[in-house]
Image: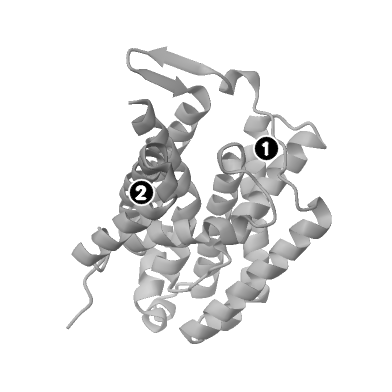
Amino acid sequence: MTIFFDGIASGVLLFLISVGLSVTLGLMNFINLAHGAFAMFGGYACVVLLNRYGVPFLAALPLAALLSALLGAVLERVLYRRLYRASDLDQVLFSIGLVFMSMAGANYFFGPTQQPLALPAFLQGQIHLPGLDAGVYRLFLIAVGLAIVLLLQWLVVRTRFGAQLRASVDNQRMARGVGIDVDRVFSLTFALGSGLAGLGGALGVEMLGLDPGFPVKYIVYFLIVVAVGGSGSIKGSLIAALILGVCDVAGKYYVPQAGAFVIYAVMIVMLLLRPQGLYGRRAAK
């Protein structure tokens, strides 16, 4: 039960970071491999706010998300917008370039070592239950993840902004014709995805660590979650992240010599069974 619980917490953390990629990739049709760089930025912002300025942890989290969203909005306006209609290869090469630039910048300003982060006392320790030792911080992660799921689902499905976003993705010309500011919708969506990445990166410092290699080290995990869950599906990303998180933790515990083999094996099997992802739409024939 403890391994299962740790796997759920790991899966929720994967979801918190990768759901932003699902939003930008699935809803905006932009291949942003630099998504991990925004998560790294959020992690560094949280560490700086905590260690240099003494900001409380619960206040540093939304501030890190906000700073990541602002960075995403600026880069979307200055750089990303120019490549919305570019080929997939151009988008991939552009975002890979941003990844290595971000890694070089992080190494220059913070050095190559892991960044320390001390959790507040109320998030440390464990809760002991029959057959289960639950970490308090992992319980906190799960609660935050569930809240994000509900808010995102409500935003995309129930709000006017969500309707404008879906319309802009389906047919930009028609959306502009009925008065929707498509550029503004895409800017806000990209900022939202970047902010979610920053929040996940800040929350993940304690579990994943933080160093300049973060964007390369974990981008494959984020892409797996999006591919298995179905591009653009919030529910699919959550279920895929939970499955992969549990399988990853269990595999590393029971067969540590196999490393990350288990999570890749699970990904291959699931994509063979559902090539479009758990909640993705089948391609038209």
Residue under the image location 43 percent in, 36 percent down? 9
Can the viewer see residue 225?
A: yes
Mark 2: amino acid: Leu
Examine the rendered structure and indicate whether residue 263 appears above or below residue 189.
above
In the depicted view, which residue is nearer to us: 248 or 222?
248
Q: Which mark is residue 60?
A: 1
Quarter the C terminus occupies: bottom left
Q: Which mark is residue 244?
A: 2
- Left or right of 130? Residue 218 is right
Q: Residues within 10 Å of mark 2 (few under 14, many from 20)?
A: many
Mark 1: amino acid: Ala
Q: Nearer the viewer, mark 2 or mark 1?
A: 2
* Residue 142 % position (x, y): 43, 34
* Residue 19 % position (x, y): 44, 54
* Structural distance between the alpha carbons of marks 2 and 1: 28 Å
In the depicted view, which residue is nearer to us: 172 or 106?
106
- Nearest to N terminus: mark 2 or mark 1: 1
Task: State the SS at label 2.
Answer: helix
Q: Which mark is residue 134?
A: none
Examine the rendered structure and indicate whether residue 250 appears above or below residue 195.
above
Task: State the SS at label 1.
Answer: helix
Question: Which residue is the extreme one toward the left?
Answer: 285
* Residue 210 % position (x, y): 66, 47
Give the quadrant of residue 266. bottom left
In the depicted view, which residue is nearer to us: 50 or 184?
50
